[in-house]
Image (spheres, rainbow, N blue to C red):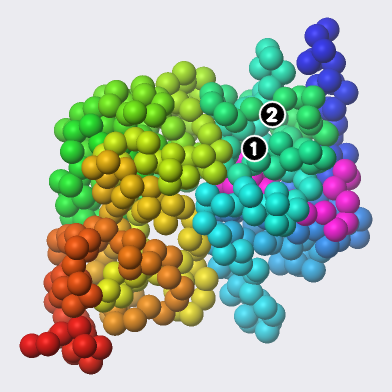
Amino acid sequence: MTDHARLYRERLCSASEAAARIPSGAKVTMVLGAGQPPAILAALADRARGGGVADVRFYYLLCTGIAGGSVFDFDLQDRLIPMSYFHGGVERALDKRRRAEALPAVEVMPCHFSQVPRAMVEHVGVDTLIATVSPMDANGNFSLGTSTDYSLAVARKPGTRIILEVNAHMPYVHGNCMIPVSDVTAVVENDVILPLLPPAPRSAVDDAIGAIIAGLVRDGDCLQMGIGALPDAVCAGLARHRHLGIHTEMMTPGLAELVRTGVVDNSRKQSHAGHTVFAFALGDQPLYDFLHDNPLVEAHPVDYVNNPFVIAQNDNVVSVNATLQIDLTGACNSEFMNGRQFSGSGGQLDFVRGAYASRGGRSIIACHSTAAKGTVSRISAALSGPVTTPRNDTHIVVTEYGWTNLKGKSAAERARALIGLAHPDFREELQRAAFGAGLWTT
């Protein structure tokens, strides 16, 4: 028996035994998305229900139903506490229930995605990592697979309690994403299908915006895409492009399809030439199959992938991200809706700045012109939430009515250009608001 195999057997235990290693008062980093470990989380929830643990705080982004149906059960909120860097459906549902019972909302941790690893390690002081990983390789390493993101920084913090759920369905991904068995506290085996993210339904407006953005992409550009129907529509519009590259925080089915069809070959990248680079992945089974043991795909920590300096090492980076609201000078609110936290800042500003710093790079912010079935304009006189992307950073804005480059435009010129991208039903109202703000003189 090799030393690696011996260490593995020594650390192998049941999910309940692994959960028992997490004490009351622990500060737990839970990996995001598909890497959340169902057996460990279910065992920890059972332990909390039995009174065996309390005051455990979870620091994480992008929760799935795995955690939503276990540790984030509403009835456990006084014992297992979510500390969210990025809200999703789970947190929004919890907030709705909490409002109904006059309880405070889920805690929000404002932070750019690139800064989350340092925030967790240095400022929060997390002491535990729980994650789903691929089976151990011949060198005694577990690949973090779909979820390198902030997890690797926590794993490398001295003294971290590392509790892993080994799952044969987790793709073995290459790159800077390995945890050696010698660093691991406990190992649980649980072979279950990974969470699948179905494609968001695309509308005619999505396809119109996607076609406009695809027209702004040139052969040889390096892509970053966000999540949702709009980025999917952009990928669909790139079928005839060639020699594209990928350096993105999130790897999606649409991007994987561009590699499979030869649209992406990463041949013109200056950094990691020939390789697709990402920090986390979430999507369908073909995406996970594409990632598995693919030597041309690399996962790296998000403080590397989303570092604007690293992003800018590639030429002609094109970042595409969606927003919820844009004011008349170009400031974007991409995380607040109806007076409440809806999502988070994520890596939007990381890539807005990195793409613009890239030689020939372009940062694109896209949105539908309206929300709430056409009753609300997304281009507005003032933001109703925090500024995710400051007006000084916003570059290109796209709606279904066209696009504009805000760089080099005065505040008044920006207002005129953005009103031209608004839905016609709201343009007169926006002109009056611009006139009142001194941004419209005729």
Tell me the residue that label 2 is attached to: 179
Looking at the image, residue 180 sits to the left or right of residue 231; the answer is: right
Residue 141 is situated, as x and y percent measured from the top left of the image, at: 68, 22
Q: Residue at x 37, y 36 (%)?
A: 313
- Kind of residue at badge 2: Ile
Viewport quadrant of the C terminus: bottom left
Q: Looking at the image, is mark 1 or mark 2 earlier in the sequence?
A: 1
Query: Against 250, is 430 above or below?
Result: below
| Amino acid type, label 1 | Leu
Extent of the magenta region = 20-40
Q: Position of residue 114 (x, y in %)?
A: 52, 49
Quadrant position of the N terminus in the picture: top right
Q: Which residue is at a point 79% across and 48% down the rendered structure image?
A: 127
Residue at 50% across / 62% down in the picture? 344
Query: Is 363 situated above or below 433?
Result: above
Examine the rendered structure and indicate whether residue 9 appears above or below residue 225: above
Q: Is residue 25 magenta?
A: yes
Closest to the observer: 228 or 385? 385
Q: Is residue 404 magenta?
A: no
Q: Residues within 10 Å of mark 1 (few under 14, many from 20)?
A: many
Task: Tell me, yes or no, whether the two marked residues, 1 and 2, touch with CB atoms within 8 Å.
Answer: yes
Please tell me how many numbered marks the rendered image carries: 2
Residue found at the very far left of the displayed protein: 442
How far from the left and from the top, in percent, is residue 143?
62, 27
Locate residue 10: give its quadrant.
Answer: top right
Query: Visible in this render: residue 48?
Result: no
Secondary structure at badge 1 equals helix
Residue at (56, 52) in percent of width and height: 115
Secondary element type, mark 2: strand
Residue at the spot of label 1: 152
Name the foreground residue: 277 vs 200. Answer: 277
